[in-house]
């Protein structure tokens, strides 16, 4: 079983549309991170959220950490083909040293 | 500055063989973590080393082992390869716990 479940697993949308990706767990996390991974490359960190209820914006991307620090969401406004990739959430459960990754959401933005 | 470098980039091995994967962290980073990413899934934590000591181990069999050298580079060894070991093996370095900086991985194919 995965500690972090992401939904949807696959998402194919037209350029200009909005989308939301969810990352859920029954565990509490001291922090949660979002990464994007492109084919043939390693994951690249987009953002880290640490406070329950925190909202961070990165251009057209909005990240939210749940109040109870068990879940997070990523919202993309006006998606562009360059947003195509595998989006991964990752969290460090309270008291743990290791970073656990979610199941991933593969996003395809069609021009 | 150079990022995390991994070698080799691709590798084909036969069942039962042994493999060694190498990782050089970003200069100044003392922590190295190894992850296994099976196609279509999120990375799974294998090991973390900090200052040459093992700090964490994921749910992997004893066929998997690793070490960190005085210059903070690291090797991941896998013995008695199985078909299911075919995956992208990612190395990540960090100054302490986070954020993680990933290399582009070693693609291992076991036939």
Image (cartoon, rainbow, N blue to C red):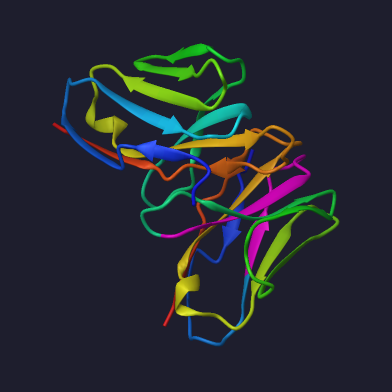
Q: Is residue A62 left or right of residue A33?
A: left
Q: Is residue B98 left or right of residue B36?
A: right
- Residue beneath the point at 53% across and 34% down: A26
- Residue beneath the point at 44% across and 60% down: B38
State which quadrant residue A99 falls in.
Answer: top right
State which quadrant residue B18 falls in.
Answer: bottom right
Q: Quadrant of the C terminus of chain B?
A: bottom left
Answer yes or no: is residue A10 visible. yes
State which quadrant residue B73 falls in.
Answer: bottom right
Q: Is residue B50 shown in magenta?
A: no
The x and y percentages for residue A106 are 31, 42
The x and y percentages for residue B78 are 63, 74
Q: Is residue B23 shown in magenta?
A: yes
Q: Looking at the image, which is closer to me, B61 or B22?
A: B61
Q: Which residues are magenta?
A: B21-38
The x and y percentages for residue A88 are 44, 38
Picture layout, residue A9 above or below residue B104: above
Q: In the orientation shown, which residue stands out farthest toward the front?
A: A26
Q: Looking at the image, which is closer to me, B44 or B14?
A: B44
The x and y percentages for residue A97 are 73, 41
Picture layout, residue B52 above or below residue B102: below
- Residue beneath the point at 84% across and 55% down: B52
Q: Is residue B71 left or right of residue A29?
A: right
Report the magenta stretch's main SS.
strand
Q: Looking at the image, which is closer to me, A63 or A96?
A: A96
Answer yes or no: is residue A87 visible. no
Q: Quadrant of the N terminus of chain B?
A: top right
Q: Is residue A93 left or right of residue A70?
A: right
């Amino acid at each position: 079983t995965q500690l972090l479940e992401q939904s949807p697993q696959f998402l194919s949308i037209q350029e200009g549309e909005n989308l939301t990706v969810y990352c859920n767990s029954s565990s509490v996390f001291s922090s949660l991170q979002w990464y994007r991974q492109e084919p043939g490359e390693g994951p690249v960190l987009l953002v880290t959220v640490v406070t329950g209820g925190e909202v961070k914006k990165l251009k057209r991307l909005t990240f939210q950490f749940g109040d109870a620090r068990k879940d997070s969401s990523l919202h993309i406004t006006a998606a562009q083909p360059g947003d195509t990739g595998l989006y991964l959430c990752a969290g460090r459960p309270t008291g743990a040293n290791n970073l656990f990754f979610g199941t991933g959401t593969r996003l395809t933005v069609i021009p | 500055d150079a990022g995390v470098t991994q070698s080799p980039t691709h590798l084909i091995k036969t069942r039962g063989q042994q493999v060694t994967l190498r990782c050089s962290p970003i200069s100044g980073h003392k922590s190295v973590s190894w992850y296994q990413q099976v196609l279509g899934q999120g990375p799974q934590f294998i090991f973390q080393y900090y200052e040459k000591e093992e700090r964490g181990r994921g749910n992997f069999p004893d066929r998997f082992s690793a070490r960190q050298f005085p210059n903070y580079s690291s090797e991941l060894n896998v013995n008695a390869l199985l078909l299911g070991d075919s995956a992208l093996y990612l190395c990540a370095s960090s100054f302490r716990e986070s954020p993680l900086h990933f290399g582009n991985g070693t693609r291992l194919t076991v036939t």
